[in-house]
Image (spheres, rainbow, N blue to C red):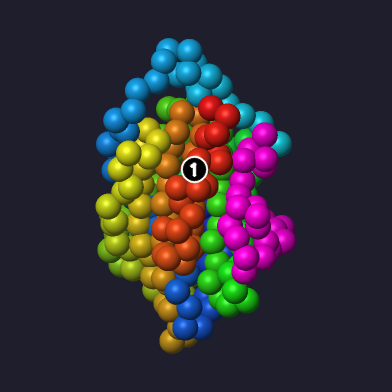
Amino acid sequence: MRVRVATTALGITAALLAVPACSTDTTGTKPNAAPSARTEKPADDALKAAPLSSAALETRLLDESDLGSGYLRKLERPAQHDDVTVVGCPALSELGGDAATGGTLTFPRKAKATFTYGGSSSEISEELYSDSPNKLSDGIDRIFDAMTGCPTYQVVAGGTAIDMVSQKLPAPRGLGDEQWSQLLTFSAGGRSTVVKQTAIRDGSLLLIVSGSPALVDRHLDKALAKATAAN
């Protein structure tokens, strides 16, 4: 089955169109909807449920001083709207165009930052979204369920065919209210990119950290701590 879709909110298309040679890069996600063990006071719950503005989310993103030496922030490029064709993934096809590419994650309140590391092709990207807890949970849960439901499929973007391999990963327990994690391998023209993506919902905040697996593991806790510091 084929579905014509637009650029994904998770940034998948950007990765597909710029697969670097011999790199080990970023993306992954799958929900392990095990709630964290911590408890909240009712007042705290009410505060966490209030969506934040995009401007407020910007202040909660990691910056170079948080990451340490060797990191350089990349300028955000204008959003691309190249048509993408998903082939061989019924789970994605059944969701339809917008949902199949993360369209349900195009919440109006959002912020993003991407960094390169050590002058190499290794990158780490952080995305923050804010909306009602139910909307955030439902949106990302559907996308990750579909993506990780297809071990292999193909994406055609901008005339380039990319072979995809998805692998569920154990989600980091004890962080936030819900967690997702996966490993994706993009292969095209003899080149492969491995991307880890981990998502955590904490109240009305959704954090997605993508990139080189080692960089995601290194900075995930720090990203969540800064994103939720004022909650």
**Mark 1 neighbour class, 10 Å CA radius: few under 14, some 14 to 19, many 20 or more:** many
To which quarter of the image does residue 130 belong? Answer: top right
Q: Range of the magenta residues?
A: 56-82
178 to 184, vertically: above or below:
above
- Residue appearing at x 67%, y 42% in the figure: 58
Query: Which x, y percent locates residue 112?
Result: 62, 50
Residue at x 47% of width, y 83% of height: 22
Magenta stretch encompasses residue 81: yes
Residue 2: give x, y in percent of width and height. 40, 61
Residue type, label 1: Leu
Q: Main secondary structure of the magenta part?
A: loop
Q: Quadrant of the N terminus?
A: bottom left
Q: Secondary structure at mark 1?
A: helix
Is residue 179 depicted above or below 27 in this figure? Answer: above
* Residue 30, percent from left and from top: 34, 50
Residue located beneath label 1 in the image: 224
Residue 191 part of the magenta segment: no
- In this view of the protein, can residue 163 be seen by the observer? yes
Asked if residue 18 can be seen in this view, the reply is: no
Q: Nearer the viewer, residue 28 or 68?
A: 68
User: Residue at the location (42% across, 42% down)?
Assistant: 200
